[in-house]
Image (cartoon, rainbow, N blue to C red):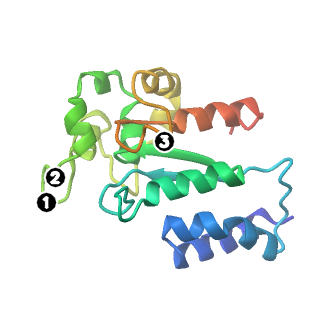
Amino acid sequence: DNLTEACNKLTEYLNQESDVVNIVNDIADIIRSSNLTYDSRLDEICLIVDRDKESFLATSENDQYGYVLRTCQKKGFGFYVSNPCFEFWLLLHFDEVIKLDKDKLLENPQITAKRRYTEHELRKLLPGYSKGKYSVGTLIKKLSVALCNAKRFCQDEDLLISEVGTNVGKLILLLVKKGIKD
């Protein structure tokens, strides 16, 4: 009934349990136990994550990526990934992304003391960009470009473990289809 209160409760939990493995296991129970209005026939739970190789592991000893993917599939949650990071989704709003080195995008090496390759390239295309502040209006106007460019990269959640791309565009299309346009 109170969307702000519900979002605050979820945010409080997510700040405490920032490990995506814990979140994917517990989020449905947290929603139910927090007296939040949730109807699995109407509502969807979606995880949107970066495929950060340093913190979202996919090794034979610790396959967090595979575990989260399988758990989301089993529980019917949406799993939306940007590889190597969310800035890649933002880069897709510009046609210049097609000219960027795919190997460098995937590796996302440190370019300066504070910035990796994707952020460095994004700052060239989106003046004034910083992680906490950027022109959303500029990006919204270029949404159709991003959706088109996304098709030129990997969008398959099974393959995003090791390929550059994102399936965030699929989430945007799902939201539009369901009538959420704002």
Please tell me whether mark 3 sits on a helix, a strand or a loop: helix
Pointer 1: what residue?
113
Real-space Cα separation, disc 2 to disc 3, in angstroms:
25 Å
Asked whether disc 2 touches disc 1, contact meaning CB atoms under 8 Å apart, the reply is yes
Real-space Cα separation, disc 1 to disc 3, in angstroms:
26 Å
> How many other residues sit within 10 Å of disc 3, few (<14), some (14-19) or many (≥20)?
few
| The quadrant where residue 175 appears | top right
Q: How many marks?
A: 3
Real-space Cα separation, disc 2 to disc 1, in angstroms:
7 Å
Pointer 2: what residue?
110
Can residue 40 be seen here? The reply is yes
Residue 129: x %, y % from top left: 33, 46
Q: Nearer the viewer, mark 1 or mark 3?
A: 1
Report the residue at 61% width, 76% height from top.
12
Up-down: is 12 above or below 37? below
What is the three-letter code of the residue carrying label 1? Ala
* Mark sitting earlier along the chain (2/3): 2
Q: Is residue 113 left or right of residue 100?
A: left
